[in-house]
Amino acid sequence: QVQLVESGGGLVQAGGSLRLSCAASEPTFSSYCMGWFRQAPGKEREFVSTISRSGDYTYYGDSVKGRFTISRDNAKRTVYLQMNSLKPEDTAVYYCAADTTACYYTTSAGEYEYWGQGTQVTVSS
């Protein structure tokens, strides 16, 4: 069972940047499709981005496309989310997720088996 630990969240002004990291315990990290989701208070969990096992394919939600970039380093068992041009509406708890059967185009949170504990991102106006 893979364990995921997110880091890198914090408070940033609108227009700023943050880089989230998600470290996995599983030695076979490269066999997992990885995703980032977020959840704001009172809202459902929202798809942010996914990346294929090799890192060759990525997919983004419309609200973050062009501002966020997902990447992974399989040797370090880590997936990253570079967030630029942050907006107050990006404020949420960000979760990374992993699954062996999902693909990079799997955007439903219910399709991912493993989840991290989340990291808070707050963007002030």
Image (spheres, rainbow, N blue to C red):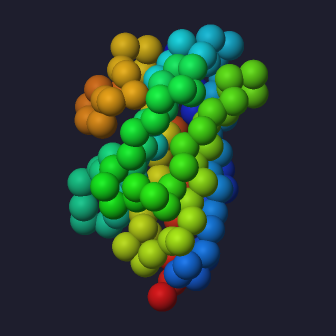
User: Residue extending furthest bottom?
Assistant: 125
Q: Which residue is at the front of the view, 65 or 45?
A: 65
Q: Residue 20: where, in percent of width, then height?
A: 62, 52
Res 52 visible: yes
Res 122 visible: no
Q: Which residue is at the front of the view, 51 or 37?
A: 51
**Residue at image point 55% right, 78% down:** 15
Q: Which residue is at the front of the view, 27 or 75?
A: 75
Q: Is residue 64 above or below residue 33?
A: below
**Residue at image point 54% right, 13% down:** 31
Q: Is residue 103 above or below residue 58?
A: above
| Residue 92 image-quadrant placement | bottom left
Q: Residue 73: where, in percent of width, then height?
A: 69, 30
User: Residue extending furthest right?
Assistant: 76
Tally the numbered discs: 0
Q: Is residue 64 left or right of residue 69?
A: left
Q: Which residue is at the front of the view, 25 or 88?
A: 88
Q: Is residue 61 left or right of residue 7?
A: left
Q: Is residue 125 above or below residue 54?
A: below
**Residue at image point 51% right, 76% down:** 123
| Residue 24 image-quadrant placement | top right
Q: Is residue 118 left or right of residue 110?
A: right
Q: Residue 120: where, in percent of width, then height?
A: 53, 61
**Residue at image point 33% right, 60% down:** 63
